């Protein structure tokens, strides 16, 4: 592996010396699903911009290219196009949705606007073999397009149709293929097989595994860190804890984990995290900076300002701890280790040249002040959470650490829409604890991605005892997901919801109403801010 250290960029990038498939990002927010599906098949994948030059791309050792979907029409002014060198490279290419249309237009095919936009489940019929090897004569797929190919380019065959729509085209001589539907989504059950077939056509060895990442990254960390010391921004969540275990494996006690109690933690979080991390043998220092954070957040209602304040304050706390450590440890600390994941980077609009729009600023990424003193160490910057969990299992970490639900870096602050106050925070903390207690007591949490409470900036009239109340409403938020990029709402037994509601109203002062959030992602995000 070859990694570079920069002031504000991640010095560690997973898989740079692995054979890879490059996914040309034409602008969809959820192209990371393609990357994740490819990695699940044992091949490293990376999103790149259509503006990437040939020299930069070939340094990534691609054996093939995937052209993603996107919001454009090929007839839009300024529509994104395929770099010509990709089609001239001789490497296999797979276009998906807009990628199919852009490919067809670039190679002399014909693309037209459909009479009606096709969105949802459909079926396609095609012959078994090649890209469609192992498929049935008729398969379900997920369509989402306004334009479609009406005439394939010269040299291409129509391999499958969905009614009158051309669903799959291919030129087996040049190994260039395209799909009108999305193979990466769950609504295309045969999608994984199609992607595997394409990767076999590329000639991959399917050797992207947790063990390979562990061995390569451990050695690379030792090389790039040399004798330097590292501070870890440890939250106690899966990402930062696995990152700490990995770096500790590489450099031992030259790692110091700093766990900051920012006052925004869940009930009992500080005690639980301290106990578990100490038991794992990680060098740990606990810092109570709660008063400092809460004072800065008081009265702030803009969610981006909250995140920026929390991110900057985190860094300042770490800088102060590093300065203190200099007195005890000659040389001090040069690196700051974070558990930043690929979705964090993408949702912050920091996706390494990809075209995803800014969704929100993650405190691990966009919340950092430009003048921070550390070199950032982010070994998981190109990994998804399920990959991090598998890596933790490879290192033998306890299941209770790896199966924790994701918790946002800004903590409960992003579950408190509206003006921030310490009083409201205390109310939320108690309500959230009840949501978690009732779900975990029944073992339901094993099937959920996240489950938590939200305190809304809404007051409503109620009656408790013989008195009128005018108090706040709390929301229950429970979602299922594979990677946090998309999420759905599961069915929850009514008696559980009723018990949660009754307990919150009766046990948490200041709340007289409980509602259930039934919104998937998209269109919403999992967190409320």
Image (cartoon, rainbow, N blue to C red):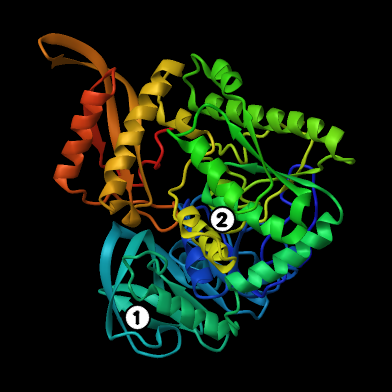
Residue bearing the label numbered 1:
160
Residue 347 is at least partly visible in this image = no
Residue 49: % across, % down: 63, 56
Task: Rate crowding at label 2 as few (under 14), some (14 to 19) or many (20 or more) other CA atoms within 10 Å.
Answer: many
Which of 222/76 is in front? 222
Quarter of the image for residue 419 reads: top left
Query: In screen coordinates, is 500 left or right of 39?
Result: left
Position of the C terminus by quadrant = top left
Residue at far top of view: 467
Q: For residue 151, what is the image quadrant?
A: bottom left
- On residue 80, the disc is 2
* In this view, 274 is above or below 104: above
Taking 11 as reference, is 228 left or right?
Answer: right
Considering the numbered disc 1 on the image, is that residue within a helix, a strand or a loop? strand
Tell me, yes or no, if residue 81 can be seen here: yes
Identify the residue at the far left of this view: 466
Residue at 53% over, 58% down: 384
> Is 453 drawn above or below residue 225 in the view shown?
above
For the residues marked 1 and 2, what is the alpha-carbon distance in whole angstroms? 26 Å
Q: Which mark is residue 488?
A: none
Q: Identify the residue shown where x is 54% and y is 38%.
A: 409
Q: Is residue 348 above or below residue 14?
A: above
Residue at 70% x, 61% y is 249
* 206 and 106: which is toward the camera: 206
Give the image location of residue 302, x and y in percent. Answer: 49, 22
Q: In the image, 474: left or right of 375? A: left
Dot 2 lies on which element? Answer: loop
Q: Quadrant of the N terminus?
A: bottom right
Q: Earlier in the sequence, mark 1 or mark 2?
A: 2
Above or below, 10 against 388 in this view is above
Q: Nearer the viewer, residue 145 or 359?
A: 359
Residue 22, image x and y in percent?
61, 67
């Amino acid at each position: 592996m070859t990694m570079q250290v920069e002031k504000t960029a991640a010095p560690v990038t997973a898989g740079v010396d692995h054979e890879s498939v490059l996914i040309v990002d034409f602008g969809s927010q959820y192209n990371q699903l393609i990357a994740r599906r490819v990695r699940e098949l044992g091949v490293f994948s990376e999103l790149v911009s259509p503006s990437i030059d040939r020299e930069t791309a070939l340094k990534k050792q691609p054996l093939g290219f995937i052209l993603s979907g996107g919001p454009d029409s090929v007839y839009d002014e300024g529509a994104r196009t395929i770099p010509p060198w990709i089609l001239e490279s001789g490497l296999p290419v797979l276009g998906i949705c807009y990628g199919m249309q852009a490919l067809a237009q670039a190679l002399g095919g014909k693309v037209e606007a459909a009479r009606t936009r096709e969105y949802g489940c459909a079926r396609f019929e095609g012959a078994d073999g090649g890209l469609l090897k192992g498929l049935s004569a008729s398969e379900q797929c997920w369509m989402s397009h306004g334009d479609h190919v009406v005439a394939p380019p010269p040299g291409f065959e129509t391999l499958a149709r969905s009614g009158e729509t051309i669903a799959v085209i291919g030129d087996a001589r040049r190994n260039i293929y395209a799909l009108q539907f999305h193979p990466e989504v769950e609504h295309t059950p045969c999608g994984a097989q199609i992607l595997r077939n394409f990767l076999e056509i590329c000639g991959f060895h399917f050797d992207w595994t947790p063990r390979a990442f562990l061995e390569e990254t451990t050695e690379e960390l030792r090389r790039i860190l040399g004798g330097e010391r590292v501070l870890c921004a440890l939250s106690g969540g899966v990402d930062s804890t696995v990152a700490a275990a990995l770096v500790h494996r590489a450099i031992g006690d030259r790692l110091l984990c700093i766990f900051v109690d920012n006052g925004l933690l869940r009930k009992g979080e500080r005690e639980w995290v301290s106990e578990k991390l100490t038991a794992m043998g990680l060098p740990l220092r606990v810092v109570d900076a709660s008063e400092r954070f809460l004072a800065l957040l008081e009265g702030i209602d803009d969610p981006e300002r909250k995140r920026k304040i929390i991110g900057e304050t985190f860094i300042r706390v770490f800088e102060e701890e590093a300065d203190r450590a200099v007195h005890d440890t000659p040389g001090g600390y040069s690196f700051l280790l974070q558990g930043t994941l690929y979705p964090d980077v993408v949702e912050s609009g920091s996706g390494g040249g990809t075209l995803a729009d800014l969704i929100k600023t993650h405190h691990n990424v966009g919340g950092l002040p430009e003048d921070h003193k550390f070199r950032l160490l982010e070994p998981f910057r190109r990994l998804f959470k399920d990959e991090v969990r598998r890596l933790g299992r490879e290192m033998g970490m306890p299941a209770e650490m790896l199966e924790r639900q994701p918790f946002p870096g800004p903590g409960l602050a992003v579950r408190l829409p509206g003006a921030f106050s310490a009083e409201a925070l205390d109310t939320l903390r108690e309500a959230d604890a009840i949501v978690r207690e009732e779900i975990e007591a029944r073992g339901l949490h094993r099937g959920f991605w996240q489950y938590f409470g939200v305190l809304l900036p809404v007051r409503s009239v109620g009656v408790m005892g013989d008195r009128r109340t005018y108090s706040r409403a709390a929301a229950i938020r429970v979602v299922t997901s594979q990677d946090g990029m998309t999420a759905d709402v599961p069915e929850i037994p009514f008696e559980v919801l009723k018990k949660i509601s009754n307990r919150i109203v009766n046990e948490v002062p200041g709340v007289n109403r409980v509602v259930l959030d039934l919104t998937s992602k998209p269109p919403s995000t999992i967190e409320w801010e």
